[in-house]
Amino acid sequence: MNFDLTNEQRDIKKAARDFAVGEFTDVAREYDLNETFPEEIIKKAKELGLVGLFIPEEYGGPGFGYLEQAMVLEEFWRVDPGIGQQLCTISFGVEELLLYGTEEQKKKFLPPIFEGNTIFGFAITEPDAGSDTAAASTTAVKDGNDYVINGSKVMISNGTKGTHMLVYCLTNPEEKSKTGRHSIILLETNRKGYEADRMEGKMGIRCSDTASIYFTDVRVPQENLIGKEGNGFIQLMNFFDRSRAYVAGHAVGLAQGALDMAIKHVKERKQFGQPLGAFQVTQFKIAEMATKVETARNMVYKAAWLLDQGRPDTKLTAMAKLYACHVAVEMVDESLQLHGGYGYFNDQDIERFYRAAKVLEIYEGTKEVEKIIIGREILGNLK
Ligand SMILES: Cc1cc2nc3c(=O)[nH]c(=O)nc-3n(C[C@H](O)[C@H](O)[C@H](O)COP(=O)(O)OP(=O)(O)OC[C@H]3O[C@@H](n4cnc5c(N)ncnc54)[C@H](O)[C@@H]3O)c2cc1C
């Protein structure tokens, strides 16, 4: 068993770290406060090949894997979760295209991510269908050569800034099995009848774009169907097996960032005549934090590595997501505690990290959903 990263992986990780430190550090707080979309940073990250790392070179991508995607996002989130989130979601949903798209679809839709301003999104969640994705009721009805889409989605990343949106639609409502009713359709967001409203007041990762979307008779050619009609639920579950691995990478990065801040602070801050880090209770705390972050990292890298070996492991990926995101939330709490009252003010990065962390236990499957998946994988379906 070899746990060493290759030289190339080390270089990519370092390039991501250098990029994040150089580009995010001075602007992250302002971007978060003002909800500024990081347009220029996206452009530069694309030029450097630091987005969509899992997209093969033949489609214009950097041609690495999910492990590299997780590592790069880890380094981004370590410096700023909001900008990290936005850089991640540039290619959000593309996994579906790679898994189920035709060659023609891949050649048409993927290269512009790197050559132009294309930004993807994946619209699944609806006001009445969150964790229960099978309840999604946005319809796509065939009419001539088109699908006509009607309905609405909520909390969708890149809803307003995205140029392309994969939409999870009800196409086969008559099907008895809940796994056979939906399909995934790719549409350009400049199509007539697509409207998006930015959702204001987000607690964290505030520079990222999150929106409600409304579809009113949006016509999309049937050739934009991704995969098979009625197979959307299965395709979605396979997508989550991939996206969860690198979302867990976000969590490792955020946790490491919170730990970095804690270490710096306890070395500098003196009370009772000595640095906080000289108290054994603080040393124990730092030791426990570092152990948890390292454990989470190992789980995430293994889950991502298995994906790159063509052996997705649903249980391990859900475990990695569950554990890493739990650790992230715990780390911001511990780190802020070590910062004392200063950590409660927004001139300290830990305040922004604290607000950002919670989303990790909500999107890409809530922590309860991850436990349902793990339990089902272990016990089987006992109903
Ligand atoms: C910043 C942000 C960005 C997002 N981006 C996207 C995006 O790009 N695309 C997209 O489609 N969605 C996106 N989402 C939505 C996200 O995926 C959902 O919020 C998530 O799936 C949970 O759905 P919900 O919010 O409706 O919560 P609900 O499903 O209503 O859950 C509420 C609570 O009930 C629990 N619960 C639900 N069902 C069960 C059960 N069977 N057993 C036990 N407990 C249960 C949940 O775990 C949770 O604690 C985003 C959300 C946020 C906050």
Image: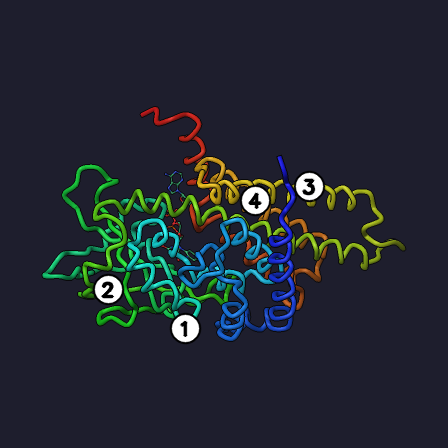
Marks 3 and 1, how far apart at CA = 42 Å
Marks 4 and 1, how far apart at CA = 31 Å
Say which label, 2 or 4, has the lower sequence index. Answer: 2
Marks 4 and 3, how far apart at CA = 15 Å
Q: Is residue 113 left or right of residue 302?
A: left
The disc placed on residue 215 is: 2
| Residue holding disc 4 | 301
Q: Secondary structure at mark 3?
A: helix
Residue 256: x and y in percent read 65, 52
The label nearer to you, 4 versus 1, is 1
The label nearer to you, 4 versus 3, is 4
Q: Secondary structure at mark 2?
A: strand
- Which quarter of the rendered picture does the C terminus lie within? top left
Give, as a three-letter code, the residue at label 1: Gly
Q: Nearer the viewer, residue 146 or 61?
A: 61
Q: Is residue 289 left or right of residue 154?
A: right
Marks 2 and 1, how far apart at CA = 25 Å
Q: Residue at x 73, y 46 (%)?
A: 286
Say which label, 3 or 2, has the lower sequence index. Answer: 2
Q: Is residue 35 above or below residue 123?
A: below
Give, as a three-letter code, the residue at label 4: Tyr
User: Can residue 351 be seen at all in this image of the molecule?
Assistant: no
Q: Indicate if the residue with disc 3 has its beta carbon within 8 Å of ligand 1.
A: no
Marks 3 and 2, how far apart at CA = 47 Å
Say which label, 2 or 1, has the lower sequence index. Answer: 1
| Residue holding disc 3 | 291
Say which label, 4 or 3, has the lower sequence index. Answer: 3
Say which label, 4 or 1, has the lower sequence index. Answer: 1
